[in-house]
Image (cartoon, rainbow, N blue to C red):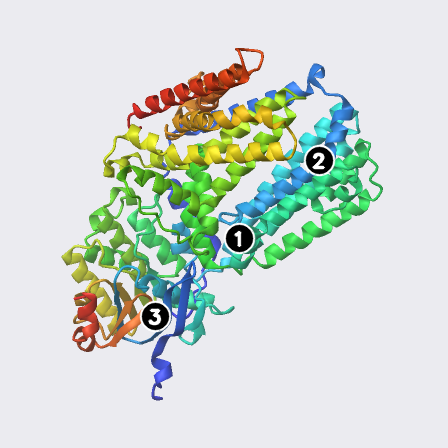
Amino acid sequence: MTAMDAIVVDERDVISFLRGRKKAHDRRSTVDRLINVYMGMFGLFYVGLVVAGFVDADSIPEPGVFIDALVWLPIALLGFMWAVLRFATWQGPVVFSEPDLQWVMAAPLERRALVMMRLRRAFVASAVAGIIGGGIVAVVVDVLLGEEQLVIFLIAAGTFAAVALLATALSWHVERSVKSSALVNRAAPAALLLACILAAAVATGHEGFVWWSGPWGWAIGPIADRAGWLVPGWPLQLGLLALATCAAVASAVAGAGRFSEEELWRRAAARSVASAAMFFGDIRTLSSVSRRERTGGRFRARRSRMARSSSPSLAIASRDVLLLRRSPRLVATSVVFMVGAAAASVAARDHALLGVVAFLCLYVAASRLVEAIRIEADQADAHRLLPWSWGTVLVMHCQVPTVVMTLLGWTSLAVVGLGGFAPWTALGPFVVVAPFAAAAVVGSAAIASARQRFPVGMLVGGNESGGLLLFLWLVVGPLIAGIVLNVALAMMRPDIGSGVGSATVVAAGFLFAASFGLLTWLRTRKVPG
Amino acid sequence: MTEQTADDRQLVVAEGVGRDYAGVPALDDFDLVMDHGQVSVLVGHNGSGKTTAMSIIAGRVEPNRGSVKVAGVDVFGANGSIAVRAAVSFAPDAPTLYPDLTVSDHLDLVGMAHGVEDVEERASAILERFGLTARRHLLPRELSRGMRQKTQLSCALLRPFAVLMLDEPVAGLDPPSRRTLWSFLAEAKDEGAAVLFSTHQLTFAEGLADRVVVLHEGRVAASGTYDDVSTSDVVGDLGLI
């Protein structure tokens, strides 16, 4: 026998041997297993409580509210399908570990069968998730409208399971091919545009378009018809959905043996980090891993270089400018939230709640710009290379975000003024206080961002105050900024104090003092960890 | 008995192979021919393209340009996959082991997946020579980096192969283990396998390599016998000796 002769070994024997050996070294104790069971049951209990709370007669909304909301469900399903496809650009339904690829997939075994084992599991999991999702919708419809339980359950569970299977099948095509992954990565604007078109169709009363716009609409059409919407072609929708799902699943099964090994290696490398981040709810790590894996090694990195600063004290500012130039998405999202803040501020005259929305948008805009502080906190020891203390470095990182926020603030005020949304005389004081307000909001965001990540152990360690701690952890930044800005706004009210000019000066002075206090406090911080 | 032609002797033929990462060529216009019973060595600095070249030959990374054939079978062709995997044994530079399998479990798994009949006997012999016998029941986390490297090399050597490729196999190995590895490579060569390994230091190729390929910035800077290459200006300029 030569090495070139493929030896026929049954892959199921190899997998079962591997499982057996792994199980033999599984050192989890009975207590560990019982804790896992407890955690699972605890989660189910929580879900049960939520469902029971909803089913409780006193809290049931008017049926009309739910029927109106049904037309938005296709957009939610479109979002779900898009999220599944997007997930497949860096993980996917068939993810092997690196040792699996090194020792099992590299052996002369039938790879199609090895992939099918995982693909089959993904299909079953997605179908079960779909049935549960559809079941929840069926329960809601049944409770609100008194529909026939079995019929509505069968329709909802079937259509949701079909959509989940369709998404999983398509996601395997994304996972197995470099080109498909790149296509999905580039198609994000198109998906967003489609969602906007669907939302516009709903808002303008063109529901017919939504029901027939794709599998997401076909899945909801039959349920909507039973709930009171008029969707005359719903049996056809069921047929189309079944056809599309069967075709996608058949195509995925047929393509199970054809894949790019490089793509599987790339996903395997990210798998352990992604799993740990998911387990600990570390969204920041998850997002950075997903971004790196989706784009890494495929696109040319931005070649912008750091500007040479004339003074050592500007080194951190130069580094922050470089970060924003290399990651324009940070500035872009900041601009989007600033636009949201301006729009909500204008509308807040009629709806007071929008004032809160405006403030939150303003805070998020600032928090996007202090990414350099989060990076600093992620690798806190690196600051020892610099000739400044940890606190001083943090304060230095506030320079560029404050300037950018001020410029964004002035631009927003100019747009509001030019658009005629507010008189120039009313905007004048805000032009004066904008730099001080920017410093205060950036300082608050900097305090929140310099703390490293939330210790999730506090949530799962049995401490009943864990939830409260998480809440405080999340709100501390917005809370500080909210208090400071609200006090300043109160000082600027025309009915308080002698005049607009002096009120503006007082408010600016207060914001200056508050910013100074926040930055001084930031400067006293010690290296975390 | 028919006379073997040059094509019959060629186990690996890579022609004009190129691969770009983020628009930057990591490997360009790479040619390599490996014959039965021949040891080839890729020498170069970090980032010179050694790992990319080996990964492409092993079928793990797809080239942007060029073709690779193992025993006449296109590595990236539709029907070549199982035959190529049966022929090529590849150990990457970083040990890739199951965290919940012991040293001997790894060897048993590899032996089973490749249909090796006398796994226990062969595994014992390899472990003995690498000095791993006493540690055969330990998990990877209980092993040093060098021990993990030797476990990976043992797995690569246990299975049948026509082409043996080791990416920086001496990294983390002590001198006795390195000598043991050299003896394994010499045996593989004597049995007619084509052997390819990569290293930063040209001296590791001395006395073993039939052919040395120097890679620099993704391109072949020099190639030939050890004596030819070691006396060339390129090696001195690159500081590889």
Q: Residue at x 79, y 31 (%)?
A: A227
Distance from disc 2 to disc 3, alpha carbons, whole Å, reads: 60 Å
Residue to which mark 3 is pinned: B162
What chain letter is assigned to the residue under label 3?
Answer: B
Q: Chain of mark 2?
A: A
Determine the residue located farthest toward the bottom in the rendered image. Answer: B2
The answer to whether residue A466 of the structure is visible from this angle is no
Task: Give the mark, 2 or 1, whose residue is nearer the N terminus.
Answer: 2
Label 3: which secondary element: loop
Three-letter amino acid code of the residue under disc 1: Glu
Residue assigned mark 1: A175
Q: Are marks 2 and 1 in contact (CB under 8 Å)?
A: no
* A188 displayed left or right of A488: right
Nearest the eye: A424 or A186: A424
Where residue A93 appears, as percent x and y from the top left, is 53, 47
Determine whether the residue tagged by mark 1 lies in a helix, strand or loop: helix
Amino acid type at circle 3 is Ala
Question: Decide: marks 2, 3 in contact (CB < 8 A)?
Answer: no
Residue corresponding to mark 2: A72
Task: Please rate how many residues cluster around mark 3, counting C-alpha atoms within 10 Å: few if below 14, some from 14 to 19, many from 20.
Answer: many
| Residue drawn at the location 41% of the way across and 45% of the way down | A20
Q: Chain of mark 1?
A: A
Q: Residues within 10 Å of mark 2 (few under 14, many from 20)?
A: some
Asked whether the residues under the numbered discs 3 and 1 touch, taking CB atoms below 8 Å apart as contact, a structural biologist would say: no
Q: Quadrant of residue B207?
A: bottom left
> How far is the residue under mark 3 from the one under mark 1?
31 Å
Note whether A267 is above or below A3 in the view shown. above
Q: Which label belongs to residue A115?
A: none
